[in-house]
Image (cartoon, rainbow, N blue to C red):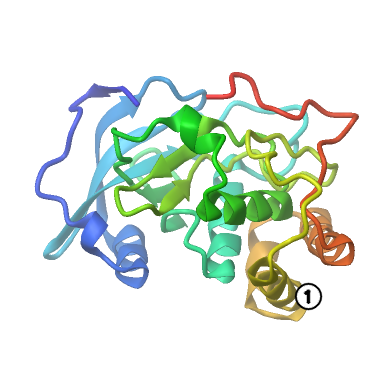
Amino acid sequence: MTAEGEASISDVDGPGLDDAAALSLLREGTLEVAGRLVEATNMTLYCSIRNGEHTAACVYKPVRGERPLWDFPDGTLAAREVAAYEVAAATGWRIVPPTVYRDGPFGPGMVQLWIDADPETDLMALMRSRNPALRRMAVFDAVVNNADRKGGHLLPLPDGHVYGVDHGVCFAVEDKLRTVLWQWRGKALPREAVNVLVRLEHEIERGRLGRRLRELLTQAEVEATWERVKRLLATGVHPHPSEDWPAIPWPPI
């Protein structure tokens, strides 16, 4: 993405931090705005964050910079981004970069570790592939009801890991899954995914994940998430596109 202002932050160690250290830095560090990502629909700021000897680049999306959405009248996009991270963390798949909700220079919002994607990766080829990392992401998107999984929201790393970002329009009560990752539609869920879904069902119903989601989402959204997990377990397959909702976001990249 293109940023107005300083386009880079030097001497960062964010990629070298484990998730626990990254979360601590994001929660407790001092934010300094370096520029704005001008391609983003809502206010998205490229920042440095420093706490003691650790410095990293991050994205800061203040609530005050959000544009109201008619189909997401309750809550905030920032809270949904954090909720998506909490679900991703519970899967163990590390799909979403470390993300927190905190105060910042323009008020409360979400702060997420910046990830430098591999510039050599062909996104069109990646999003059409059968990469196991993308299959896990397809399961995750079905759980959180991601209405905007574009190819540009995939951040592939040189080691083969793939992160996903921009989860502000997830967790709708109505089915709104829109994604470029339909290559497994109707296919049986892998055993790994089934095991993860069983764990998610328990964690949402009576574990830490459910308690955390209720802090970030409406009760109806949490219940709908739980129901989606149970439906995936009951059908045992990746979902098909809805006949009542566009299957692919626009633009797809």
Q: Position of residue 114 (x, y in %)?
A: 32, 46
For badge 1, the amino acid type reads Glu
Q: How many marks?
A: 1
Res 152 visible: no
- Residue 250, quarter of picture: top right
Q: Position of residue 229 (x, y in %)?
A: 79, 63
Q: Nearer the viewer, residue 112 or 176?
A: 176
- Residue 234, quarter of picture: bottom right
Q: Is residue 54 left or right of residue 228?
A: left
In the displayed structure, would residue 216 be above or below residue 10? below
Residue at 75% x, 78% y: name it: 202
In the displayed structure, would residue 65 be above or below residue 75? above
Q: Is residue 77 left or right of residue 241?
A: left
Residue that numbered label 1 is attached to? 205
Res 47 visible: yes
Q: Nearer the viewer, residue 67 or 124?
A: 124
Residue at 44% x, 55% y: name it: 99
Structural crowding at the residue carrying mark 1, measured as other residues with C-alpha within 10 Å and reported as few (<14), some (14–19) or many (≥20): some
In the displayed structure, would residue 222 be above or below residue 38? below
Q: Position of residue 151 (x, y in %)?
A: 52, 32
Residue at 77% x, 52% y: name it: 187
Q: Position of residue 170 (x, y in %)?
A: 67, 44
Q: Quadrant of the N terminus?
A: top left
SS of the residue at dot 1?
A: helix
